[in-house]
Amino acid sequence: MAKLHITWKKSTIGRPPEQERVIKALGLHRLNETVVHDDTPQIRGMVNKICHLLEWSVEE
């Protein structure tokens, strides 16, 4: 299964609380931190909700 490399690049200060909860649900704790998740529809949905705060790439 493909993997998503997700890096948190922009702060959630001044953003809606829902976006901060998505950051925490992805397992991100601080800026410029990178996590790796399986490429599932649930993870893709979370990434799409906050794509303006993240950088991500797919690794086969």
Image (cartoon, rainbow, N blue to C red):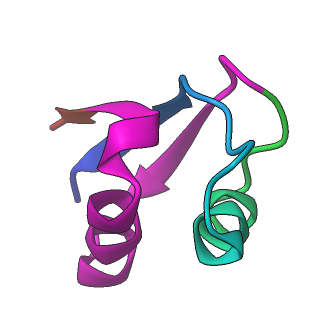
48 vs 13, nearest the viewer: 13
Quick check: is 37 in the magenta stretch?
A: yes
Count of number-bearing discs: 0
In this view, the residue farthest toward the right is 29
In this view, the residue farthest toward the bottom is 42
7 vs 39, nearest the viewer: 7
Tell me residue 57's x, y (percent). Answer: 24, 30
Q: Which residues are magenta?
A: 31-56
Tell me residue 10's x, y (percent). Answer: 56, 27
* 51 with respect to 5 (left or right): left
Instruction: Confirm whether residue 5 shows in the render.
Output: no
In this view, the residue farthest toward the top is 32
Residue visible at 69% across and 48% down in the picture = 14
Quick check: is 25 in the magenta stretch?
A: no
Tell me residue 35's x, y (percent). Answer: 60, 38
The vertical placement of 8 against 44, above or below, is: above
Residue visible at 26% across and 62% down in the picture = 48
* 42 with respect to 36 (left or right): left
Residue visible at 75% across and 42% down in the picture = 13
14 vs 46, nearest the viewer: 14
Instruction: Confirm whether residue 41 shows in the render.
Output: yes
Residue visible at 65% across and 17% down in the picture = 32
The vertical placement of 35 against 18, above or below, is: above
Tell me residue 9's x, y (percent). Answer: 54, 23
Image quarter (top left, top right, bottom left or bottom right) of the N terminus: bottom left
Q: Quadrant of residue 23?
A: bottom right
Q: Quadrant of residue 60?
A: top left
46 vs 20, nearest the viewer: 20
In this view, the residue farthest toward the front is 14
